[in-house]
Amino acid sequence: MSKGMSLTTLIAPPMIGDLLARGAIAPSVAAANKRQALAIVSEMAARAYDLKASRVLDALLEREALSTTGVGHGVAIPHAHVPGLRSMSGVFVRLRPPVQFEAVDEEPVDLIFAILAPMDAGSDHLRTLARVARGLRSPELRLQLRQAQGADAIRALFAQEPRSSAA
């Protein structure tokens, strides 16, 4: 077990807030389209997690080609396994204005929470995806994220995730 990692960390997926490193939250980003939004996410991930932006973008686009990760209500949860990543990680972007994302409800997306998984993540990837999706289903959380003033406020909202929810 690595330093700072508990048995709980090995069993349960990380809390939503724990996925986001410093520099992995952008409270106001402009993108012309879905691809540009994913490129911005990739650049942020590259800086925050010491990755190659092109690898992140390729992985996200490959997953997006299978089916949209626009889940509705202005939310997208792109996710992919990324070479070189050592732990489950995330990037959160609030787009202004929203962009078309081929979402299931055909509404434009303004909240993107990208989940990046190590190549060997296995079921941890799916459990983390489920946890993030459950959190972002909350109309209250979505409203708070849209109104939050800055990255620290957004981080605080994700840190308030109820700890009793099972993955």
Image (spheres, helix red, strand yellow):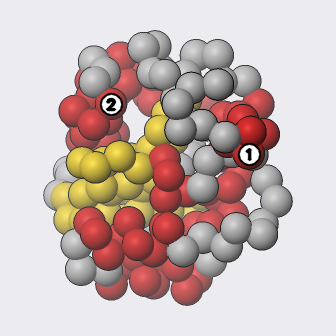
What residue sits 43% from the left and 83% below the top? 144
Task: Give the amino acid type for the residue marked by disc 2 in the picture.
Answer: Tyr
Q: Nearer the viewer, residue 15 or 7?
A: 7
Pointer 1: what residue? 8
Relative height, residue 83 to residue 132 (above, below) = above
What residue sits 71% from the left and 51% below the top? 130
Q: Position of residue 96 (x, y in %)?
A: 23, 67
Q: Position of residue 157 (x, y in %)?
A: 45, 74
50 left or right of 146? left
Query: Which label belongs to residue 100?
Result: none
Pointer 2: what residue? 49
Indicate the quadrant containing the N terminus: top left, top right, bottom left or bottom right.
top right
Cα–Cα gap, marks 1 and 2: 23 Å
Relative height, residue 121 to residue 137 (above, below) = above
Q: Quadrant of residue 44?
A: top left
- Total marks placed: 2
Q: Residues within 10 Å of mark 1 (few under 14, many from 20)?
A: few
Task: Give the amino acid type for the residue marked by disc 1 in the picture.
Answer: Thr
- Whether pointer 1 and pointer 2 mark residues with C-beta atoms closer than 8 Å, the reply is no
Q: Position of residue 73 (x, y in %)?
A: 54, 71
What residue sits 53% from the left and 38% below the top? 4
